[in-house]
Image (cartoon, rainbow, N blue to C red):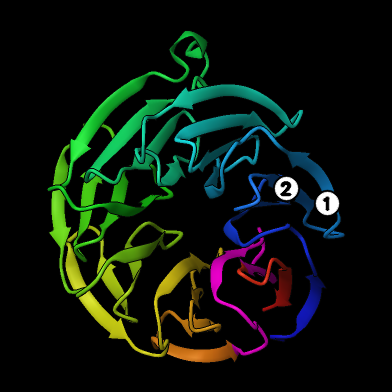
Amino acid sequence: MYDTIRTVADAHADSIWALAWTAGTNRIVTGSLDDTVHLWSGASFARQTQLREHHLGVGSVAVNAAGTLLASSSLDSQIRLTDLRTDTNQAVIDAGALEAWALALNPSGDTLATGSHAGAVHLWNTGNAEGDAEKQGQKRATVETGGAFVLSVAISPDARTLAAGTESGIVHLIDLASGKRLNALQGHTAGVRALAFSPDANMLVTGSDDHRIHLYDVHNADYLSSLAGHANWVTALDFSPDGAHFASASTDKRVKIWDTASRQCVHTFTDPTEPVWGVAYNGDGSRLATVGDARALTIYST
């Protein structure tokens, strides 16, 4: 338990900023400042496909629950939709300069949320729903969040709630169907770079440049707890599929495992040698992947 299983050195030619692990198809997705997205087997950890369509560093990736659709965005302001059944480009959305810093797909994959530098969340139609092919790439709505850079976005597993973390430290909860802002969660004193909903969609965990992790009750918008342990920015969060634990990553070169019920850190991985930018559990929660400035893909047992 809590052992390093595999490290793929030089998984990319530059820092790896984006990571996802598909539960439906057991594939790992990594996005790098080397302009590429790589697809890996979640069983053998062998690289299967390299996607080279982006022209500047890839900053965010998102996959739907079935693992059939990938959204990736880069500093070239373009969002690319990839069909993971064939690993082919499906569509390109020109979001505009700094309008797609962070990405989130709803579970079915028919709605894409993006966070912008101007302080808005955009909702896009991916064309993934039956009969929606002609709507692919169309913007459905724009939700203003008060002008602060939206650093992170996440969609709840029940597809009802969108969370947007901002540079000001405020996290906005938005009704995904209507685009109406529901609540503003306060407590952080710096930008919120990481968000994760619990599998039952009842809890939201947030990570900030203030080095803290906060837990909130989603439905009542109540602050539950603040966790200390990282010594620098908290850059990524992910819940285990059973909700019993969640993982956090930081620019302090540490990855931590937290017990959700006790809200205590139960393990710290100290082997990363550079800042860590991504964490992701596999479908059954037995493995955890991490990526970062070391350009490596590391797999741990949990």
Q: Position of residue 70 (x, y in %)?
A: 60, 37
Residue 179 seen in render: no
Mark 1 to mark 2: distance in Å? Answer: 7 Å
Q: Residue at x 53, y 45 (%)?
A: 62
Residue 139's place in the image compared with 158, above or below, is above
Residue carrying label 2: 38
Tell me the tag on residue 47: 1
Q: Nearer the viewer, residue 163 or 166?
A: 166
Q: Quadrant of the C terminus?
A: bottom right
Could you tell me the amino acid type at mark 2? His
Q: Residue at x 63, y 45 (%)?
A: 35
Q: Callout 1: few (<14), some (14-19), or many (20+) C-alpha neighbours within 10 Å?
A: some
Residue 281's place in the image compared with 266, above or below, is above
The residue that appears at 41% across and 58% down in the rendered structure is 200
Number of the label disc, if any, that sits on residue 241: none
Is residue 55 found left or right of 298 in the rendered image?
left
Q: Position of residue 292 (x, y in %)?
A: 60, 68
Is residue 261 depicted above or below 281 in this figure?
below
Q: Position of residue 10 (x, y in %)?
A: 78, 64
- Looking at the image, residue 19 lies above or below residue 96: below
The part of the chain drawn in magenta is 269-291
Say whether residue 280 is magenta: yes
Q: Residue at x 49, y 32 (%)?
A: 78
Residue contact at pointers 1 and 2, CB within 8 angstroms: yes
Nearer-N-terminus badge (1/2): 2
